[in-house]
Image: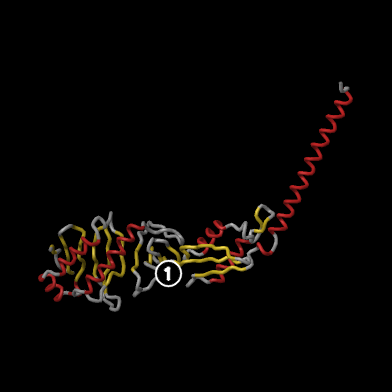
């Protein structure tokens, strides 16, 4: 039968074995961490070259400089953010879109030999959005991505935002649905006017009226004439509004008046179904 001294000796030896196992495990883990750090710090795993493909207006060098800025420093105070295994892809995309609002899409690909490739797409100017004297270029979705000059004869449609609207670079000005309505209407309007007595004229500016109303300024950009106003409502489809316009333009009475008083046309109102109102300066409103 084991004596008390034997039992105590066995307990002590068992404790020592556990301590040795823990120490060895700790040393092995530490060694693996050190090996891993050295492994990941190897230049093979570091991003040494940045390629940017797809820029047209945005300067490629500026994008690369911003990427270098984001990749500086270390992740968890140990691993370089420039490592192909630890670089912050989501942060990188967010920073680039904030710094360069013109960029609409950014796709990042890791190539061999430490190369990081950025495939980018730039927004296309669809409108110029202005509030008072402050103007921005906008894409089809309403994203304001760069300041725009305010001058007459611009080939893009100018949208005059309500005074109470706040315009901020990088933000969306209006809903995509509203802008699509405007885009569809103006594109079809150009075709309708080209085949009428308004040849050469187009919508150059639009203002938001009450509720769903829109006020288009129509004129020939090549001439000094002040133009005339076309009133429409977004409650109707662009096709319905243009059908009413076509009916008015085909009216013999209207065409006779237009030939005689072309420069006196004040407005044409398409806001009402199956009715078109128009007015010449110094005359009463006429219904067709």
The x, y position of residue 68, in whole percent, is 61, 65
Which residue is identified by label 1?
A: 148
Instruction: State which quadrant residue 89 falls in.
Output: bottom right
Is 157 placed left or right of 193 in the picture?
A: right
Mark 1, other Cα within 10 Å: few <14 / some 14–19 / many ≥20: some
Is 162 placed left or right of 82 in the picture?
A: left
Q: Residue at x 34, y 67 (%)?
A: 158
The x, y position of residue 2, in whole percent, is 87, 23
Q: Residue at x 36, y 61 (%)?
A: 161
Q: Which is more toward the observer, 244 or 26?
A: 26
Q: Which is more toward the observer, 156 or 28?
A: 28
Residue positioned most to the front: 1
Q: Residue at x 39, y 59 (%)?
A: 173
The x, y position of residue 39, in whole percent, is 70, 58
Query: In terms of secondary structure, where does tag 1 sit?
Result: loop
Instruction: State which quadrant residue 87 falls in.
Output: bottom right
Whether 222 is drawn above or below 82: the answer is below
The x, y position of residue 244, in whole percent, is 18, 63
Q: Which is more toward the observer, 110 or 276?
A: 110
The C terminus: image quadrant: bottom left
Q: Which is more toward the observer, 263 or 56?
A: 56
Is 127 placed left or right of 286 in the picture?
A: right
Q: Residue at x 80, y 38 (%)?
A: 19
């Amino acid at each position: 039968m084991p004596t008390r001294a034997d039992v105590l000796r066995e307990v002590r030896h068992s404790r020592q074995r556990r301590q040795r196992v823990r120490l060895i495990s700790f040393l092995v883990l530490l060694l693996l961490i050190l090996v891993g750090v050295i492994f990941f710090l190897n230049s093979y795993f570091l991003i040494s070259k940045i390629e940017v493909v797809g820029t047209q207006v945005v300067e490629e060098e500026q994008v690369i400089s911003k990427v270098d800025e984001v990749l500086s420093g270390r992740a968890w105070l140990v691993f370089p953010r420039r490592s192909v295994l630890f670089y912050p892809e989501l942060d990188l995309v967010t920073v680039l879109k904030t710094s360069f609002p013109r960029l609409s899409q950014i796709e990042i690909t890791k190539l061999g030999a430490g190369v990081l490739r950025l495939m980018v797409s730039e927004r296309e100017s669809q409108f110029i959005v202005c509030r008072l004297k402050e103007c921005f270029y906008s894409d089809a979705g309403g994203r304001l991505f760069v300041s725009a000059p305010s001058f007459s004869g611009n080939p893009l449609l100018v949208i005059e935002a309500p005074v109470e609207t706040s315009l901020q670079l990088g933000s969306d000005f209006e809903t995509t649905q509203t802008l699509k309505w405007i885009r569809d209407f103006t594109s079809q309007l150009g075709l309708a006017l080209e085949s009428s007595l308004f040849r050469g004229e187009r919508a150059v500016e639009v203002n938001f009226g009450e509720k769903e109303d829109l006020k288009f300024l129509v004129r020939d950009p090549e001439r000094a004439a002040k133009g005339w106003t076309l009133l429409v409502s977004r409650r109707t489809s662009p096709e319905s509004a243009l059908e009413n316009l076509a009916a008015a333009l085909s009216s013999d009475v209207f065409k006779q008046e237009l030939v005689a008083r072309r420069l006196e046309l004040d407005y044409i109102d398409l806001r009402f179904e199956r009715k078109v109102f128009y007015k010449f300066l110094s005359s009463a409103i006429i219904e067709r």
